[in-house]
């Protein structure tokens, strides 16, 4: 059984650019949640995708968007990057919306 | 609004000593509470959840609704317990969102 994987591991972008982060969910999981973890903070919920539909969103602006594909992998897209978007982005998959979430290793995004 | 507070950013104990990591929450309904742990160079993983009422790696946590707390305890800390610990809350009855505290870094000294 393969765990949750994320790519890339690290990414450096400049302010105003756009970025796409990817997540492959664990085998058998149909739900993916995305979190932003700023330095010294706990993870903060961005949104969740369940069976390819957005199923809940945290307090993030519309320039944070996502997709889930038929194989339940997912993308997080961030437009018009700001310096404060620099953070670790975590993806978590689960077998259902309310079941235990299994986290990936994260993507470290730096915005200069 | 849902909020989780972990008052200690850092906690240091000696091996064999008892350890308690504090977690307080703010939520008007019935919450589900969790403890997640992140060991060095590893990913975030679930340690325990209050509805399971089980002991994992010697850790226990009891939900105290009167004090709105969910403190994590272990009677005899081990060096391998050194890690970052996060308390998290989810609204019971169906919510996709986990709300995390800022975390406590536990160091167990030999």
Image (tube, rainbow, N blue to C red):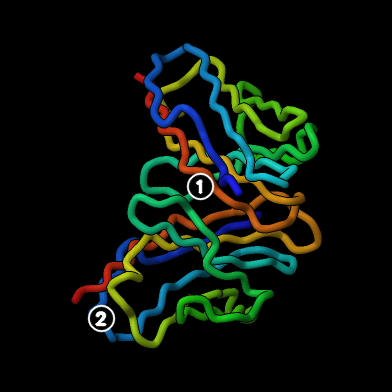
Q: CA distance from mark 2 to mark 1?
A: 29 Å
Whether pointer 2 and pointer 1 mark residues with C-beta atoms closer than 8 Å, the reply is: no
Q: Residue at x 63, y 45 (%)?
A: A26
Q: Is residue B71 above or below residue B84?
A: below
As drawn, the residue found furthest toward the front would be: A1
* Discs 2 and 1 lie in a common subunit: no
- The chain that hosts pointer 1 is A
Quarter occupied by residue A56 = top right
In the rendered image, the vertical position of residue B92 relative to residue A19, given as above or below:
below
Characterize the local packing of mark 1: few (<14), some (14-19) or many (20 or more) Cα atoms within 10 angstroms: many
Q: Position of residue A76 (x, y in %)?
A: 60, 27
Q: Is residue B101 left or right of residue B18?
A: right
Q: Which residue position is annotated with label 1?
A: A43
Please tell me which residue is depicted at 41% across the width and 33% down the height of the picture: A108
**Residue farthest top in this picture:** A16
Residue at 77 percent across and 29 percent down: it is A70
Res. B14 image quadrant: bottom left
Q: Which mark lies nearer to you, 2 or 1?
A: 2
Question: Element under label 1?
Answer: loop
| Circle 2 chain | B
Q: Which mark is residue B15?
A: 2
């Amino acid at each position: 059984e393969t765990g949750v994987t994320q790519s890339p591991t690290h990414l450096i972008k400049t302010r105003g650019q756009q970025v796409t982060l990817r997540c492959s969910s664990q085998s058998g999981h149909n739900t993916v949640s995305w979190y932003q973890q700023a330095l010294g903070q706990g993870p903060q919920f961005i949104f969740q995708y369940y069976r390819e539909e957005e199923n809940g969103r945290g307090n993030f602006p519309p320039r944070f968007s996502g997709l889930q594909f038929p194989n339940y992998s997912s993308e997080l897209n961030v437009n018009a990057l700001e310096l404060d978007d620099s953070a670790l982005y975590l993806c978590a998959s689960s077998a259902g919306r309310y079941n235990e979430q299994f986290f990936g290793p994260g993507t470290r995004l730096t915005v200069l | 609004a849902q909020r989780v507070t972990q008052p200690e950013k850092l906690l240091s104990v000696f091996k064999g000593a008892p350890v308690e990591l504090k977690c307080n929450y703010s939520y008007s309904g019935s919450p589900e509470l969790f403890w997640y742990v992140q060991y060095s160079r590893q990913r975030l993983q679930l340690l325990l959840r209050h509805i399971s009422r089980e002991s994992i790696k010697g850790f226990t946590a009891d939900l105290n609704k009167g004090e709105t707390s969910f403190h994590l305890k272990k009677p005899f800390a081990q060096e391998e317990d050194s890690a970052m610990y996060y308390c998290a809350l989810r609204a019971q009855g169906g919510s996709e969102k986990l709300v995390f505290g800022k975390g406590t870094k536990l160091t167990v000294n030999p």
